[in-house]
Amino acid sequence: MSLSSAHQRPSRDQAASTERQPPDGTPSKTAEAEPGEPAEAAEADSPAPEAAAGGGAEEEQGTQGDSGAPGSPTRRRERHPGVRRAASWSLTALAAVLVLSAFLMPDRLSRLTVSHFARVPAEPILLAALLLVLPPRPRRAVAVLTGVVLGCLLVLDCVDMGFHQTLRRPFHLLFDWPLFADGLSFLKDSAGRKTAYGALAAALVAVLALLVLMPLAVVRLTKVMARHSPVARRGALVAGVVWMTCATLGIQVAGTNLAARNASLRVRGHVDLVRQGLADQKAFATKLADDPFAKLPPERLLSGLRGKDVIFTFVESYGRGAVEDPALATGIDAVLRDGTRRLADAGFSARSGWLSSPVTGGGSWLAHTTFLSGLWVPDQQRYRYVSSSDRMTLTSAFKRTGDFRTVGMMPGVTRAWPEGRFFGLDHVHDSRGMGYRGPKFSWSPVPDQYTLSAFERLEHRKAARRPMMSEVVLVSSHTPWAPIPRMIDWDRVGDGSAYHAVKKEGRDPKEVWRDPAQVRREYGRAIQYSLTSLIEFMTRYGNRNTVLVFLGDHQPVPAVVGVDAGRDVPVAVVAHDPEVVDRVSGWGWSEGLRPAHDAPVWRMDAFRDRFLSAFSAPQP
């Protein structure tokens, strides 16, 4: 081919082939200006058919210079126009599916059904109407912004699913960010570090991909609507009429309204949570300052417990389901009934009831703070307010009397814990200060039996000490409930080295969590272990001055007790001195360690005032 012939105008056949319609079915004259839109803008927004189909200047150059080459891109495209058209339509369809999924995505796994997505969302109809009336440049900006917002909303929906599945509440944009670190810690303990960090990397990649792909999808659909604006306008009008009809008549599919506005409701829900959180600051400050026991003289405070050793014990994830769920309660009920008998043989009496926790599935520190402070603390914001205040807690009330040494046994604390001062603890024994030389049991750094043994060794058995108030946290029943320690002879506990062999006997958490039935079974075994440790401690080391108050902090995750379980947890008072038991006889609680189904249910924040009232001398 000569140089001059390479620059000749393409033949009529070649020109016809390059002027074919693009895969979206756009005729060549769609580059004309839309009504009310300058011609230049239309050209800028609607590329020539070649460009829309993936060609452009490079394709034109190839047509002029290499049109005769057997392997040229133009020749290949000419031979496979259907492939190009199918690929373009497939991308457009995928973009539409992605965008519609973002508008219709539920915030709970239980709603992730086909019928939930077989609905007509209102938001994309309104968005399409807006985009169709905007000029090209604002239209692109709105499309990109919408894509980013939808990407963020879809990520937030996935996070909400996880929170509802574990904590039975949505993610709070102001307060819940620290919980991601707890989730990573749980994964490392239950599935291993590699799996945990692999899951973290995959989640970050997925988030970035959504934040990139969603704007691209919206922009692509916007361009298609601009090129087919008459059809798009009619389609938006028809969809709007359909939505209004379905909404007016209340038409449903599989029990779900066909007319949907999920996205706007989800956004509104999170905005309301943020607004409520900000408004709660002032309201909670008033509650924080209102303390009927703040001015009670120290000599009257807790006068009915002078000379006693009082132990407040929290049992991790010990909820009503552990006592009443038929799939869980058999073994636990046997432990409670046998424990009541063994305590009675040792001279102890017990009364039990129910408390309603502010949290479920997790957030133990919020439940502990609610119980001890007498204030409802369901979120991190309130926790920060309370723990930085001078509010008198149950534990600090004992210190205020001047007659008690106050200590904490905190096996779950692995670093500095300044909140110990707020709770009025003279000394805190955390996981680093108990002398433990054994292995971790998944999340739990120290087995419960060792924690109680260390408490006896470090504090309880000391001679010539003052009466003592202790806060003891038992964590062996914390998720993932594998491997679970077993009881060993108390004389063999020592420095915990014996638990290396015990851990080898336990189960792998990755195997347990593959089967929901196994998760429930291992949870039940973990609660039995924690309760047995506590009961044996009391019968072995308790005396006539020992008073035990023990309770669960919250229900376990819904995977164990179901999504409809309440927030009640068992609570019991155990004492050797009949006068102590007489002071709580008016509470209407059940005899023994197992509360009856119809035993009184108090909010957890009510316990502090009731306890202080029962054991303090009233103002003259």
Image: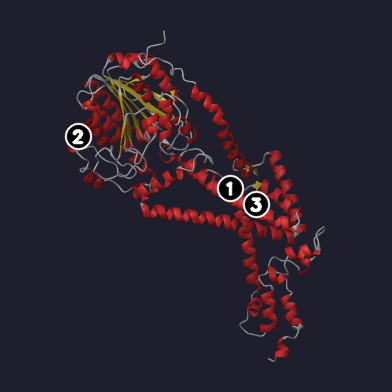
Q: Amino acid at mark 1?
A: Leu
Instruction: Name the quarter where the C terminus is drawn.
Output: top left
Q: Position of residue 421 (x, y in %)?
A: 38, 30
Q: Position of residue 231 (x, y in %)?
A: 75, 57
Q: Position of residue 328 (x, y in %)?
A: 35, 35
Numbered circle sitting on residue 490: 2
Instruction: Name the quarter where the N terminus is drawn.
Output: bottom right
Q: Along the polypeptide, which appears first: circle 3 or circle 2?
A: 3
Q: Which residue appears at 74% of the width and 56% of the height? A: 232
Q: Which residue is mark 1?
A: 153
Which image quarter: residue 435?
A: top left
What's the image's color scheme? Answer: secondary structure
- Characterize the local packing of mark 2: few (<14), some (14-19) or many (20 or more) Cα atoms within 10 angstroms: some
In this rendered view, identify the residue nearer to me: 421 or 259: 421
Between the C-alphas of marks 3 and 2, the distance is: 63 Å
Q: Which residue is mark 3?
A: 146
Q: Is residue 23 above or below residue 145?
A: below
Q: Secondary structure at mark 3?
A: helix
Q: Is residue 136 left or right of residue 94?
A: right
Q: Amino acid at mark 2?
A: Trp
Q: Is residue 232 left or right of residue 320?
A: right
In this rendered view, identify the residue nearer to me: 325 or 320: 320
- Give the farthest residue toward the left: 491
Q: Which residue appears at 64% of the width and 85% of the height? A: 69
- Characterize the local packing of mark 1: few (<14), some (14-19) or many (20 or more) Cα atoms within 10 angstroms: some
Q: Position of residue 382 (x, y in %)?
A: 49, 32
Q: Amino acid at mark 3?
A: Thr
